[in-house]
Amino acid sequence: MEDRIIIFDTTLRDGEQSPGCSMTVEEKLRMAKQLERLRVDVIEAGFPIASTGDFEAVRRIAGMVETSSVAGLSRTVLSDIDRTWEAIREARKPRIHTFIATSDIHMTHKLKKTRAQVLSDAQRAVAHARSLCPDVEFSCEDASRSDMEFLCEIAEAVIESGATVLNLPDTVGYSVPAEYGAMFRTLRERVPRTSGIILSAHCHNDLGLAVANSLAAVENGVRQIECTVNGIGERAGNAALEEIVLALKVRSERLRVKSSVNTEEIYRSSRLLTNLTGMVVQRNKAIVGANAFAHEAGIHQDGMLKSALTYEIMTPQSVGITHSTLVLGKHSGRHAIKKRCEELGYNLSAEELERVYGEFCTIADQKKEVFDEELLAIVEAVEPGAQEQYRLEALHVSTGTNVRPTATVELKSGEDRLVDSATGDGPVDAAMEVLRKCVSDVADIRLEEYHVDAIRGGTDALVDVRVRLSKDGKILTSRGARADIIMASVEAMIAGMNRLLREEHENRGKNPR
Ligand SMILES: [Zn+2]
């Protein structure tokens, strides 16, 4: 019999707190919904004590998720644990995840506590959490650089206090596979009581070994892996969920364990996250990169044509990548759009369909054919239910040889109309400049990054623009998809401004860790 591996997704906690990956409450809810469709076992929804925005996101995810467990992270401070419990108590399967650093480096320099103090903090925290919640995970932060004797001592103590899961993270991405696996093997030998709980791995990718380390842990008795979609996370990121899940699946005869993840939802989860955060995955990224299933080298193609088994260890279909030839055009009605979206995995509400259809018609008017990838970009660029403070009413651009590029923009904000014009180094620059002039309360936003992609490669393709904006240290990415590059840029910019304003409103007093 194969053992089951618990997939603990921390995209919304460890992933989200890394630079450039922050999401609004609404965006986190969308991602959580998709994670549930992906059938991860545990969704770590956030760090409730970090801010009211974090608390609210965790609370709403806990109330919404039906099948997965919902975990909230907490330090060992008892009032933090109470606050975390408050956020997750409505979940069908709540889990309190509490942690304290156990390496001498962290205890001495960060916590300024002795081993005895850390041990007693951990025991007290776990016992308190357990008095509130039947499922309690304890993590020894920086476990891979902690003293093995002390790890065993603390494991014994927290199991005694009621921990149901013990996580030993490689917080700084320092370990190598044999060593990380051995840590678990030694722990199991020296602390037999670990057989009554779940051991968990949590690896960072600083040396590119997060997935390898996680699998080494599995080979040494670990039955929970903590990971993130696309491997997002602090610095070089966390272990990538898609790589772990496919490794477990493709190599099940060797690893002899299995997960419950629905691999056909992997590609969609990856795309949604990219869309929400703007963190694009590299083309050669395993499983979800654009080239992951491309066999272009002549000798490989020859082999593939003779038998897919020659070079293909898994199929694109198994991770939900579909290649369709269906083309929509300006005469396609609402019904056809709705149906195609459903086939691509998006069940649009009536309101969403209206907005997607509106966008689609504008684009189909300009270009004859709309392909699946382009339809997806349209769907993903439409934010559900978002209140938009600024709307584009009109845009005029002039450019050419011997002309200073000039843009005129008309925006609507409630009943107000804002019109202005500006010049720039190019038409996009001029359009950006005029937006900044129009919208005084986001005048201090900075354009950090500007990225253009033609979705199907040709000049007649839909243009996908992503912009990275910052304001008062807050960074976010937004997106616009249009047939026209300047329109797409302006749409992306306005969507980003609207989100910055919304978040400022939502996250008053946010002070992330
Ligand atoms: Zn981490």
Image (cartoon, rainbow, N blue to C red):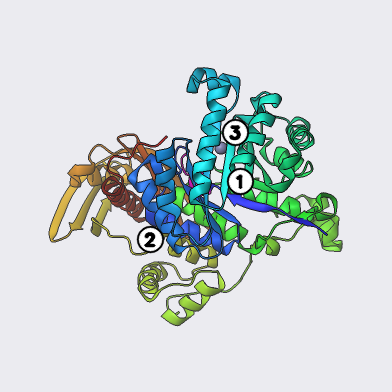
Q: Nearer the viewer, residue 369 or 201?
A: 201
Question: In percent of the image, x 38 and y 48: which residue is there?
Answer: 55
Left or right: 335 in relation to 301: left
**Circle 2 residue:** 383
**Label disc, if present, on residue 250 of the rendered structure:** none
**Circle 3 residue:** 140
Left or right: 390 in relation to 170: left
Do we see residue 288 in this rendering? no
Residue 316 location, quadrant: bottom right
The amino acid at mark 2 is Glu
The amino acid at mark 3 is Cys
- Compared with 100, 361 (above or below) is below
Whole-percent x, y for residue 28 in the image: 44, 54
Tell me where the magenta segment starts and ends, as one range.
11-17
Question: In percent of the image, x 38 and y 60: which residue is there?
Answer: 383
Q: Earlier in the sequence, mark 1 or mark 2?
A: 1
Ligand 1 shows up in the quarter that is top right
Secondary structure beneath label 2: loop
Left or right: 120 in relation to 486: right
- Compared with 90, 444 (above or below) is above
Whole-percent x, y for residue 322 in the image: 63, 66
Question: In percent of the image, x 76 and y 58: which residue is there?
Answer: 314
The amino acid at mark 1 is Cys
Whole-percent x, y for residue 352 in the image: 38, 70
**Circle 1 residue:** 227
Badge 2 crowding class, 10 Å Cα cut-off, few under 14, some 14 to 19, many 20 or more, is: some
Whole-percent x, y for residue 469 in the image: 35, 41
- Asked if marks 1 and 2 touch (Cβ < 8 Å), the reply is no
Measure how far apart labels 3 and 2 are at the Cα level: 39 Å
211 drawn magenta: no
